[in-house]
Image (spheres, helix red, strand yellow):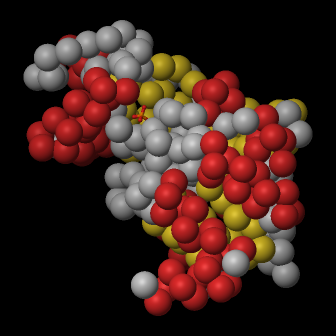
Amino acid sequence: MNHIYLFDVDGTLTEPRQPIDPDFARFFERFCRTHPVYLVSGSDLPKLKEQLPTSIIASAQGVFSCSAAELWVDGKTIYQLDHQFPKDLIEALESFVEMSQYPRRFGNHIEYRTGMLNVSVIGRNAQKSDRQSYFAWDRQEEERSAFIKRFIETFSDYEASAGGEISIDIVPKGWNKSRALAVLKQDMPDGIITFFGDRMQPGGNDYPLAKALREDSPLHRVMPVESFNETWALLNTITSPRIGALLQAS
Ligand code: M1P
């Protein structure tokens, strides 16, 4: 029986959009060399390469990027599924950015990726402290979740999810991380999967894959985490049962 490990990246292996912690990177690279690992991210490959060392990307079995609209194995594209988004949908995203009550903008508000769009009121050029300010404001105002609700009522052929701190991912219906399960099952129908992610709640971009795993088999495991430190502690329970017993006892 194959046991496969899937990991979201931002918020699960790294702080959002930040490079991986060097000590955790050493640990995780070892884990990737000794266990079958796939990364499943909303980000694109160039951004993942800014955050993770080549040694980790190369020792993973594969990288699902752009919410699994792309799969890379050994640096080669296995598939890339693109989509032409309609003009009125893009206009709706532009007016969301314009109309937001949040006072600051940093540029690069709608990013086009393979098979998906990413929209951000403050913009992808925002630095860490500006991201955190927007994240705190959005948590209070619930701007993103209110927009997601309105958006999917209007554009019912599309899905929207808040994958990280400052933005919303938009994909055609069904084009979400759950594609990773469908793809892996083609080659490993009996594979048992453990998935780590920080956005497993409805509306989060890890939710569709978590849901698909729960529905597919009771043997799969879904591990919601809030930080890379939590992922690290959970992986310790897998690689070192004695540490695991200690953590469970504490
Ligand atoms: O991988 C999680 C998310 O990371 C970024 O989110 P944000 O910039 O909002 O923190 C984006 O790359 C997003 O697409 C992705 O889902």
In the figure, residue 168 lies in which quadrant? top left
Where does the image place residue 49, in percent across and percent down from the top left?
68, 30
Comparing 148 with 29, the one in front is 29
Residue located 70% across and 78% down the image: 240
Where does the image place residue 206, in percent across and percent down from the top left?
49, 55
Q: How many badges with numbers are in the image?
A: 0
Residue located 36% across and 10% down the image: 107
Residue 32 as seen in the image, left or right of residue 8: right
Residue located 72% across and 74% down the image: 239
Q: From where the camera sits, is residue 183 visible?
A: no
Residue 121 as seen in the image, left or right of residue 86: left
Where does the image place residue 211, in percent across and percent down from the top left?
49, 67
Q: Give the vertical position of 101 relative to 233 (above or below).
A: above
Q: Give the vertical position of 91 relative to 56 (above or below).
A: above
Comparing 47 with 111, the one in front is 47
Residue located 55% across and 68% down the image: 233
Residue 210 as seen in the image, left or right of residue 92: right
In the figure, residue 162 lies in which quadrant? top left
Q: Quadrant of the N terminus?
A: bottom right
In the figure, residue 219 lies in which quadrant? bottom right
Q: From where the camera sits, is residue 53 visible?
A: yes
Q: Give the vertical position of 129 relative to 224 (above or below).
A: above
Q: Quadrant of the C terminus?
A: bottom left
